[in-house]
Image (cartoon, grey):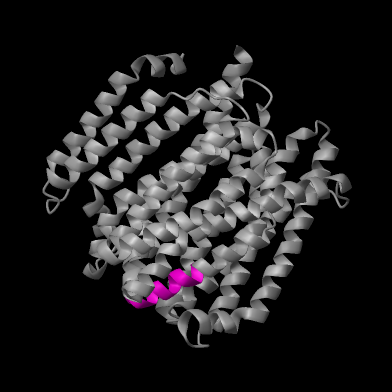
Amino acid sequence: MSKITSQLKNYIFHGLVYGFGSAFDAIVGFIVLPLYTLHFSIEEYGIFSFLILISTFASSVFYLGATSALTRSYFDYDDLEERKKVATTSLYITLLGAIMQISFGLIFCEHLSVLLFKTTIYKNHILLILISSTLLFINQFFYLLLRLLLKSLHIVSVSIFSSSIFLLSLWILLFRYDYGILSPVIAFILSYGIATIILLFLCKNYLSLSPQKNEFKVQILFGLPQLLSGFSYYAIDWIDRFFINEYLSLGDVGVYSFGYKIAMLIHMIFIIPFSKVWATIRSENLNKNIDTLSSKVLTYYYLIGSILALLVIIFIKEFFLIFSNNIDYDPAQYIVPFVIFAHLIYGMLNIVDLGIFKNRKPMYKGIILLVHIPINIILNFILIPKFGYYGAAVATLITYFLLMVTVSYTSNRLVKVHYEKFNLFIISIISFLTILISIYAIDNSQLFSINKFLIFTLLLIFYWYYFRNDIKEIYK
């Protein structure tokens, strides 16, 4: 029992450290929003969003699934020297992907600029954003290795330092040199490049020159299907921008992307730190009573995540006031409830895919994600012409919900997990009612009104009362 208690305290400690790091990243991420809205028109913000899209799509393919494969293979070996070789194998695969992505950028940057923007002006922007995302997925390998070693303080320290470099560089490039859209791209390269050097120094003792040769095949077979998953996810996540650009305007893409960015607060403050801890817990306990643990974790993931999401939704006017003084972006606040819960639901995939993960069937997940691309396209095709970018937000929520249900059903056929469905239903109903009350029963023009605090307080009291026995048991 003392061993379990010690492990639990260890995981909680690392979770809190990651939470602090993610909170800092979130602060930096949202400090830059007023800078963007001050210096970029909504059309320029739309262009910047497409640059991020290009880098995201490229890195989801060219990272070659190496980090996903390392998570699955690392704890298959007990010997520390063998683990070093396994990690080195993943690093070599990652570096191969990095060379391929930069080569892709050199060859196709001009073509992409013409395709997306009808001009060659942005070819250098595209090449540089691809270089920055290459550095990012190399860094993600190092971060993962340190995470598997439970070196959370190292990870967060480097992350905070890198984010600070980015913020300082961005401010100088925007205010001193007026580089416009190119400013954040150059700032990405500077911050990621410095982080790469530091991370290599921190990780050198956990790597070896020689790889585990047998792992090349194992990791590639596990990792390549992850490319399908990553590509499909980002296709689903970004298709709506293309439809908005087609049916509406580039300015509407900028407004929608800004609201989407606010909704992604849930990623920074909760989903990312949770996934970092959960990945290690699941890998270490894969052959133990992981099914029971997964059931309980899903309930409390959804509970805590929904509370944080509702906090953002109830005080959405206040958040927008903090992050933008440009009233052109104000309509974006109404897409936040749909998008924030869509991503909270998507985050469940890393819990409900237990059977797929344990049985090394990543292709199942990739195919399921691929199938949902046309579903998302059809929903956007129907909803955006009728409801504008609000239709895109609804399409995202419906797609991610169907995706989560399908992955859960498929995974459960491989490893049976009895999830607490009634508790999940209660959380969903309470969240829906709270959103309705915050939209229709509260005067949103009043900042920090007593009614907003009252609703959120009542929400916490209800959940405490409903889950009190569980919470007391976990505390014990």
Q: Is residue 187 above or below residue 219?
A: below
Measured as percent of width and height from the top left, residue 16 is found at 49, 36
Q: Residue at x 56, y 54 (%)?
A: 370
Compared across the picture, whether 191 is left or right of 148 comes to left
Q: Quadrant of residue 472?
A: top left
Q: Is residue 43 magenta?
A: yes
Measured as percent of width and height from the top left, residue 132 is found at 59, 68
Q: Is residue 74 magenta?
A: no
Compared across the picture, whether 74 is left or right of 189 comes to right
Measured as percent of width and height from the top left, residue 165 is found at 53, 63
**Can residue 352 be seen by looking at this rendering?**
no
- Total marks in image: 0
SS assignment for the magenta stretch, majority = helix
Q: Is residue 117 above or below residue 18?
A: below
**Can residue 54 be seen by looking at this rendering?**
yes
Measured as percent of width and height from the top left, residue 204 is found at 77, 50
Find the magenta span and give its range.
41-52
Q: Is residue 262 above or below residue 357?
A: below
Q: Nearer the viewer, residue 15 or 197?
A: 15
Q: Which quadrant is the N terminus positioned in?
A: top right
Q: Nearer the viewer, residue 283 or 368?
A: 368
Q: Nearer the viewer, residue 166 or 424?
A: 424
Q: Residue at x 28, y 61 (%)?
A: 332
Q: Quadrant of residue 39?
A: bottom left
Q: Residue at x 25, y 55 (%)?
A: 334
